[in-house]
Amino acid sequence: MDPTPPPSPPPTPAPPAAAAEPALSNLPTICPICGEAREEDAQFCEACGHNFAGENGAPARIGRLRGPLLWLVILGWAIIAVIGLAWLYTGLYGL
């Protein structure tokens, strides 16, 4: 028999500070962007994605491409299409 005690489990991490999250009771009950009612414990609008705890009332970005990035994606797809059509044309007709 080994007289050494088994190793103790690692300490559990402390829960995050409650001050890090905004008080949900202070948030508006109706979304200022789309007018939908806010769920009781929701921080984001279910309809438009607005961050109720946001600073300036701007809607949250939901993945839409805008500005130069949009044009870069369009240009990339156009280049791929032209190369694909050229490859298809020369491959099928052997020109």
Image (spheres, rainbow, N blue to C red):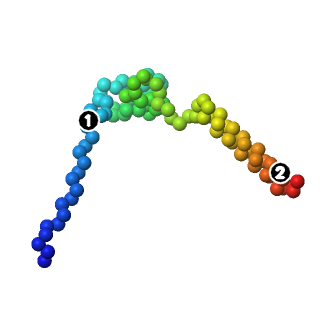
Quadrant of residue 70 in the image? top right
Task: Say whether residue 18 is left or right of residue 49.
Answer: left
Task: Say whether residue 71 is left or right of residue 46.
Answer: right
| Residue 50 spot, x, y in % from top left | 44, 29
| Residue 93 spot, x, y in % from top left | 87, 55
Quadrant of residue 31 in the image? top left
1 and 2 marks in contact (CB < 8 Å): no
Q: Which residue is mark 1?
A: 18
Examine the rendering and report whether any part of residue 37 can be seen: no
Q: Residue at x 17, y 66 (%)?
A: 6
Examine the rendering and report whether any part of residue 88 can be seen: yes
Q: Quadrant of the C terminus?
A: bottom right
Question: How far is the residue under mark 1 from the one under mark 2?
Answer: 63 Å
Q: Quadrant of the N terminus?
A: bottom left
Residue kind at label 2, given as amino acid type? Tyr
Q: Residue at x 76, y 44 (%)?
A: 82
Residue 89, label in figure: 2
Task: Say whether residue 19 is left or right of residue 38.
Answer: left
Residue kind at label 1, given as amino acid type? Ala
Pick whichever, 15 or 68, lies toward us: 68
At mark 1, the secondary structure is helix
Q: Residue at x 37, y 32 (%)?
A: 43
Specify few, some or many for label 2: CA neighbours under 10 Å numbering under 14, 14-19, or 20 or more.
Answer: few
Ranked by sequence position, the earlier of labels 1 and 2 is 1
